[in-house]
Image (cartoon, helix red, strand yellow):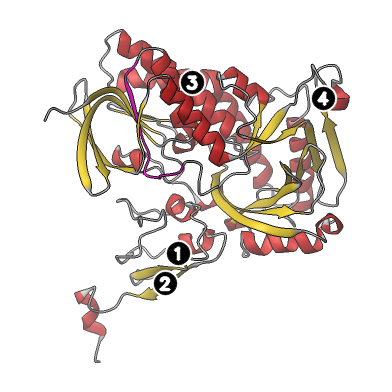
Amino acid sequence: MSIPIYDLVIIGAGPAGSTTARVAANLGLRVLVVDKRQELGAPIQCSGAVSRHALEATGVPIDDEYIHEAIYGFGIYDTHGQKTTIDYRKVKPDEYGEEEGKKPLGYVVDRRRFDRFLLTQAERAGVETMLKTEGLGYSPNGGDYCHVHLKRFNQTMEVKAKVLVGADGLQSQVGKWAGLRTHIKLSELASCLQFVVDRVETEGLLEIITGHKWAPGGYAWVFPKGHGYAEVGLGVIRTMTDKNAQWYLDQFLQESFLKDRFADARILEIQGGGVPLAAPLRKQYAQNLILVGDAARHVNPITGGGIHTALSGGLIAARYLAKVIQEGHQPNQEVLAGYQDLWLEKLGRKMWKLYDEKTAIFQGQDIPIRDQQLYETMSSYFHPESEYKKI
Amino acid sequence: MGKREPVLFQIGWNACIQCGACIAICPQKESFVSAFDTIAVDRPCDIACMKCEDICPVTTITHIPVPSAVTPSANLFVGQ
């Protein structure tokens, strides 16, 4: 039996993998997406906030199918409860609002439906997919193709790809196959936990609570989730405390200045994840291989937001790969380094700058000063004039 | 500090939220993972740095010493 041949084989059907797939297929590449799960988006490891701009810029149709609730701005709290509100319904009332002809700033999406939606869009563009299919390894032979070893149910199989795209998340195995330095430091991985709750009021804003007391190294959040639900969660850096995320989330619900709002809360679901508050991976490519999304640490190191960066990174990767493959270049290290250069130019340099800002804040030893700096940085980050607005 | 003794990790499967933080933090060179996106539980970890236990947001990773049948070298310490 002859081995199936693809331009791209993508491992991981999250936002980064499915976007890379859709855009590449639309540009004429033959693409296979595999994912070991049978349902996408689950287990949920993310609060699901994404800007409308991010969706529009990457060609994702806005659709009620995956939207939990529309977002119109931010509320940022300091450690004592002082609040900066940036409500775009008030800042730019002609453009943003619930009324006809006005738009939301962003959305909280249902990751199960959102990830399914993105893969369906890719499939409609001609992408082949195999779920319940695990990647086992890859063998580059120094030429135009690499062999990708897969396992579907109990059957092992092999396909050939010009480029293997690792979109397999923070715990990327694809990166490990290629010997890329994907290992992350304990001091740069936020351990996140969130409750989906009923009976907590929200008002169309993403609320962010800063302060070492509430979430050392990270922040706490209250996001609207639609249907009267909310997400209450936080991320902590374990090297900055001897207590874990669970302890902090209980403290936040019971003792914070928002405790009265949480008094009636009923916990419906518990979700969690590891979020890299780290620099982008220094090397995101190898022979016949690149990484996208969380696998390449395309995550905003200040907010921990990763959907926008996954979608944008996928778009950049797909366009670049389509170009080099269609021009007949061999996808070796020199050629694929161009993907990283392009990504750095369009997105990565700003992410490095954010990382440096974050690092500077948390290097400080004085907790009140650090708290104040983080609060100011977060407040200015979401300001309408921020240079980072579109990350 | 001397070299740590190898350990065998155990996961509370009902408490685990499959967040992947333990794998992300794991310094093992070869993929040290279980079929459920956690660190491996079917073979000893000879690094025993315990970073996975620290990062777990629901505190559900624990460890036991490696049973002597798994590492023959551990027999040296048995019966003395």
Mark closer to the observer (1, 3): 3
Q: Are marks 2 and 1 in contact (CB under 8 Å)?
A: yes
- Secondary structure, mark 4, is loop
Crowd tier of the residue under label 2, counting other residues whose Cα lies within 10 Å: few below 14, some 14–19, many 20 or above = some
Same chain for marks 2 and 1? yes
Crowd tier of the residue under label 4, counting other residues whose Cα lies within 10 Å: few below 14, some 14–19, many 20 or above = many
Q: Residue at x 70, y 29 (%)?
A: A106
Q: Is residue A99 left or right of residue A139?
A: right
Q: Which residue in the structure is indicated by mark 4? A: A97
Q: Which residue in the structure is indicated by mark 1? A: B50
Decide if residue A293 is in sight here: yes
Q: Which mark is residue B63?
A: 2
Distance from the alpha carbon under mark 3 to that under mark 2:
43 Å
Q: Residue at x 19, y 22 (%)?
A: A143
Q: Quadrant of the C terminus of chain A?
A: top right
Q: Which residue in the structure is indicated by mark 3? A: A315
Q: Is residue A63 left or right of residue A72?
A: left
